[in-house]
Image (cartoon, rainbow, N blue to C red):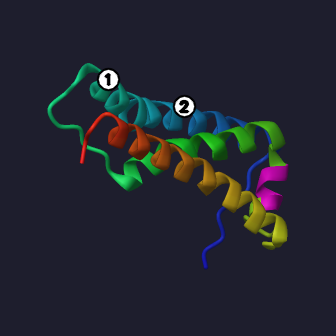
Amino acid sequence: MADIPVGTDMQERVLGGLFLAIGALATHFFVWSPYLEMQAGAEEVEIKFLRVLFGPVAMALGLMQIVLGLGAAKILGRGDYEASWRTAVALTAIFGAGLLAYFWLDAQATAFGYG
């Protein structure tokens, strides 16, 4: 497995800000916009699992990078750091955020009468 290089604490936080911004944009287009279309009564609304999952996952990863800086690399097992039980817990929480967004949007689609 190729090691993902680890930068300085500030570089990790800037990377987190980038992930947060990209995740916010993706969440706007792939979660919030379809929800608003449902509310407006659009005839057809497209919900794709990976698209909905991407935004919240990128935002959660970005928040983790911003808050923890270099500590995020240690927890995620990047570079010279080894993965541990903390890695599994962090990734479960990060992907859990994406799954919650998908299930919420799917439930809203059902409530609005979409397939």
Marks 1 & 2, CB-CB < 8 Å contact: no
- Label 1 vs label 2: CA separation? 25 Å
Residue position for label 1? 39
Q: What residue type is labelled 2?
A: Ala
Q: Which of marks 1 and 2 is in front?
A: 1
- Where residue 17 sits, quadrant-wise, is top right
Q: Quadrant of the N terminus?
A: bottom right
- As helix, strand or loop, the secondary structure at mark 1 comes to helix
For image coordinates 23% across by 38% down, the residue present is 45
Q: Identify the residue position indicated by label 2 in the image.
A: 21
Q: Can residue 77 be seen in this view?
A: no
Residue 73 covered by magenta stretch:
yes
Could you say which is closer to the camera, residue 25 or residue 103? 103
Residues drawn in magenta: 71-75
Report whether residue 107 is seen: yes
- In the image, residue 95 lies in the stretch drawn in magenta: no
Q: Return the x and y of residue 89 as percentages of the image width and height.
A: 77, 63
> Residue 8, image x and y in percent?
79, 46
